[in-house]
Image: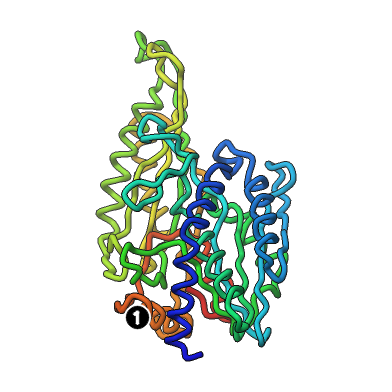
């Protein structure tokens, strides 16, 4: 069967999966998989459902690898499903992640975030895009190969990892440390985590990512006697504004591979301090999400942060402590002429008749971990 004919045949087969794919999205979203850091109990229930689903589809093998996260009873599961090919010397991997982020303010949702609904040709629900689109598309792409009368040239393996949304410590990082021979030289690894509506973006680079937790310590006092205390919340507000301005000014570089093409430094989460209005807080906690171009280092960012902290400590009499829930320097980029990139470009052209474009994203996906640890051994995108 010629490649063009095979592509057409696969397209027809996959089109027939539409209702099954929507149903799987609904069933996956109905099982929230939140990290213990985000108030959940991990991916255990979703993994158990997924394993039963994959076994029913008759994958060649389905394997579960449990990472021993002490914060999560039963550990953090990672799942691998394989389709055997003619030549096992190379494996084509498709990696996606099971965990999702919390739904946020429920009032901003038009319905239950855990109940997927179809509207105007779109699926709406928590997790349908990040990253269940990768899970579902890879599952049914593999199913289409199993439904063909021919056998794939090489093995195809789907890997569904844990903990991507909160640092990957119990997902791909743990897998690389505990199973160092899982990925072989010459393997192709595809991570469907970033893209564009046209299907033409091939992610080959990521920004550095650093989440900073700032704990500002002052002195609690009644709000009617502010001169007797040190207002940690007020100091925090000044520090947030100073950091935002100083970091943007210190790192003006642009790289058009990325969208946006600049480093970004955004104040995000704010922890509760005192429960009542008439108390000046003695401690205040806030966070920054920093996405930094590869041309700049996180150490340089922290030098600027340190300077602004020193100024605020001196002005307000507070003490500021830092913690880093997530900190990863940008991984080496995948070469735009790597076999996996060229193969994806050809696939986009064959299927959509569009020209694909290698691009970079804001950072923090499982692809960054792979590019850091196994670029020298595999072709990764």
Task: Decide which of 1, 282 is in the foreground and name it.
Answer: 1
- Position of 170 relative to 95 (above/below): above
Q: Position of residue 84 (x, y in %)?
A: 67, 78
Task: Decide which of 180, 12 is in the foreground and name it.
Answer: 12
- Position of 134 relative to 101 (above/below): below
Q: Position of residue 240 (x, y in %)?
A: 33, 39
Q: Secondary structure at mark 1?
A: helix
* Residue 306 shows in the view: no
Give the total of numbered labels: 1
Give the quarter of the image for residue 237.
top left
At 41% across and 31% down in the image, what residue appears? Answer: 106
- Position of 188 relative to 300 (above/below): below
- Seen as rendered, the residue at the extreme bottom is 2
Give the quarter of the image for residue 181.
bottom right
Q: Position of residue 277 (x, y in %)?
A: 38, 14
Q: Position of residue 178 (x, y in %)?
A: 72, 64
**In this rendering, would 177 be left or right of 299?**
right
At 71% across and 54% down in the image, what residue appears? Answer: 67
- Position of 366 relative to 212 (above/below): below
- Seen as rendered, the residue at the extreme top is 224
At 63% across and 44% down in the image, what residue appears? Answer: 42
Task: Decide which of 152, 311 is in the foreground and name it.
Answer: 152
Residue on which disc 1 sits: 349
User: How does the figure colour the protein chain or chains?
Assistant: rainbow
Task: Decide which of 94, 110 is in the foreground and name it.
Answer: 110
At 27% across and 53% down in the image, what residue appears? Answer: 248
* Residue 36 shows in the view: yes
Using a 10 Å C-alpha cutoff, classify the residue at mark 1 as few (fewer than 14 neighbours), some (14 to 19) or many (20 or more): some
């Amino acid at each position: 069967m010629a490649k063009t004919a095979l592509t057409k045949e696969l397209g027809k087969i996959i089109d027939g999966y539409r209702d099954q794919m929507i149903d799987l999205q609904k069933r996956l979203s109905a099982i929230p998989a939140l990290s213990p850091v985000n108030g959940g109990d991990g991916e255990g229930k979703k993994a158990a459902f997924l394993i039963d689903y994959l076994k029913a589809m008759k994958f060649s093998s389905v394997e579960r690898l449990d990472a021993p996260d002490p914060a999560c009873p039963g550990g953090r599961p990672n799942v691998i499903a394989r389709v055997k090919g003619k030549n096992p010397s190379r494996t084509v991997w498709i990696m996606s992640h099971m965990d999702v982020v919390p739904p946020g303010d429920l009032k901003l949702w038009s319905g239950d975030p855990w109940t997927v609904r179809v509207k105007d040709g779109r699926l709406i629900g928590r997790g349908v895009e990040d990253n269940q689109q990768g899970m579902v598309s890879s599952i049914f792409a593999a199913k289409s190969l199993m439904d063909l009368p021919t056998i794939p040239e090489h093995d195809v393996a789907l890997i569904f990892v844990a903990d991507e949304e909160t640092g990957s410590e119990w997902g791909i990082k743990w897998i690389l440390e505990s199973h160092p021979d899982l990925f072989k030289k010459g393997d192709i690894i595809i991570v469907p985590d970033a893209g564009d509506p046209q299907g033409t973006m091939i992610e080959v680079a990521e920004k550095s990512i650093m989440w900073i937790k700032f704990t500002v310590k002052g002195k609690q006092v009644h709000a009617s006697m502010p001169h007797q205390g040190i207002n940690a919340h007020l100091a925090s507000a000044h520090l947030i504004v100073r950091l935002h301005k100083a970091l943007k000014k210190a790192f003006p570089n642009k790289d058009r591979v990325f969208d946006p093409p600049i480093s970004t430094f955004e104040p995000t989460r704010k922890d509760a301090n005192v429960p009542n209005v008439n108390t000046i807080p003695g401690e205040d906690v806030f966070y920054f999400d920093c996405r930094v171009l590869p041309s700049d280092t996180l150490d340089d960012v922290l030098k600027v942060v340190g300077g602004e902290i020193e100024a605020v400590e001196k002005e307000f009499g507070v003490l500021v402590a830092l913690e880093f829930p997530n900190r990863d320097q940008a991984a080496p980029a995948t070469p735009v002429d790597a076999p996996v990139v060229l193969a994806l470009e050809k696939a986009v052209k064959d299927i959509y008749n569009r020209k694909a474009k290698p691009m970079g994203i804001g950072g923090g996906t499982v692809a960054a971990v792979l590019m850091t640890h196994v670029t020298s051994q595999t072709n990764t995108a």
